[in-house]
Image (cartoon, helix red, strand yellow):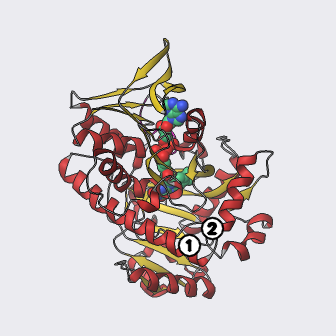
Amino acid sequence: MHSCVLGGGVIGVTTAYQLLMAGHEVTLIDAQDNVAQMTSLGNGAQLSYSYVAPLADASIWSKWPQYLFSPKSPLTFKPQLDVSQWSWLAQFLSASNTKRARKTSLQLLTLAQLSQAQILTLMQQEQLNFQHKVSGKLVMLSDQASVDSAATQIAFQAQYGCEQSILNMDACLRLEPALTHAQHRWLAGVYTPGEAVGDCAEFCQSLMEAMLQSTRFQFLSNSQVIGVEKKANRLSAVKLRQINGTQKFVADNFIIALGVESVTLARHLGFKIPIYPLKGYSITVPVTGATSDAAPHISITDLSQKIVYARLGDQLRIAGRVEIVGNDLSIEPKTIAELVVATQDLFPNSGDLSDVSFLSPWAGMRPATPTGVPIIGQSPVRNVYLNVGHGALGWTLACGSAALLRNLICGESPAIDATPFSFK
Ligand SMILES: Cc1cc2nc3c(=O)[nH]c(=O)nc-3n(C[C@H](O)[C@H](O)[C@H](O)COP(=O)(O)OP(=O)(O)OC[C@H]3O[C@@H](n4cnc5c(N)ncnc54)[C@H](O)[C@@H]3O)c2cc1C
């Protein structure tokens, strides 16, 4: 069986690995010269197995005016003459209620728990270097309403095996002394000891090196999928644009894992997938020597600003913002400056923040479905499978999603109920 995985982000790379382990001949195809060069490159680095509540939540209704009009809003909405933007937004708002958010949280928790187990297995099977650390996570809360809402979510998730607790500021400071400078900003923190961090791009590159040891694996880089050949509801070949021209590529199965670009290929194949790009940004601050303990060792989320801080060895990754602005990857200096200021406010001595060009400014597109639930499984085309729409949690959910898709493709008994993730 020859399987062709389209897209070498973290979702495609993990899918390729699972199919290789299942005995398939596997070709991984990507438009870039290496794996993980798009959304999987500079993300927030959080392996957020318990903190999976979706963006589509009832609280969006009361926060919407602040999100739209406050200059300090962590969300930007630029209305466009684009039906897909409005249609996605309508579905997102219709999913923004407590009942749907709870259902989504549960579905994502199940997939996240599978992912956590899978990444540990994978780390035992392969020699991978990606700065993985079970650092624990503190989500910092600045007002009583946020504390009350967190307490409700914790009680709900506790029924499903999540170990989380609310800590007062003294306890937060004992766990993470680097919070001292900005302690006045918060009332409490939610502590989740099992959360981890890791560099997603290093993980992908490391896993690819492991796969390249096999004669059944090949990576076609600089190969952009530009068209399809479909016969009798079956994809017979994809057309690739490569450095030396175009070629047709034939395989038995195709797996779409093209992140936000999956929408275009699905359209070529005659069906629609409800994914919209949610833009976000990051910077990476070198943290060295004397300043090392001024940067947090635990993963920190500043909930009111929706900014995450993850320690990756001698670097601090800072990521945030949600922008509904279309597929525009330009890096706004103003937004990068906001991330720099936020870091200076919280962890002023954590590193040299004076020259932005040393901070690897980055923007990426979260491939988001309206509910936040990814689509994993058979597509309407017979030999085409989907592993798409992981939104803000693709790094966290990748290993579980890949394992589940392998179960489905190989006719194995699924590790978890696959129904919530099926294409509808
Ligand atoms: C600011 C930010 C912070 C984030 N933080 C976190 C976090 O802390 N934890 C977490 O779990 N998740 C996080 N995410 C989400 C996570 O990064 C994504 O969900 C994940 O990277 C998506 O992976 P993917 O493989 O689906 O997409 P991508 O990584 O974008 O991969 C798609 C691949 O397809 C290729 N491609 C596209 N079109 C074509 C074509 N026509 N032909 C060939 N190849 C093509 C691209 O080159 C790319 O390599 C964050 C995202 C952002 C933007």
Residue 22 on image: x %, y %: 23, 42
Residue furthest out toward the top? 244
Could you tell me if the residues under marks 2 and 1 are in contact, i.e. CB atoms within 8 Å? yes
From the viewer's side, name the closer residue of 338 and 54.
54
Name the residue that disc number 2 marks.
95
Type of amino acid under label 1: Ala
Percent of width and height locating residue 6: 44, 34
Q: Which mark is residue 176?
A: none
Left or right of residue 247: residue 275? right
Q: Nearer the viewer, residue 251 or 260?
A: 251
Q: Residue furthest front?
A: 232
User: Separation of disc 2 and disc 1 at Cα?
Assistant: 7 Å
Residue 407: say if magenta. no
Question: In the displayed structure, would residue 4 be above or below residue 362?
Answer: above
Residue shown at 56% from the left, 51% from the top: 366
Whether residue 38 is in magenta: the answer is yes
Residue 334 can be seen, yes or no: yes
Q: Identify residue for label 1.
A: 101
Tell me the element at label 2.
Answer: loop
Residue visible at 75% across and 47% down?
83
Q: Position of residue 319 (x, y in %)?
A: 55, 56
Cβ of mark 1 under 8 A from ligand 1: no
Q: Disc 2 marks which amino acid?
A: Ala
Eyeballing the image, is 174 above or below 256?
A: below
Read off the magenta span. 34-39
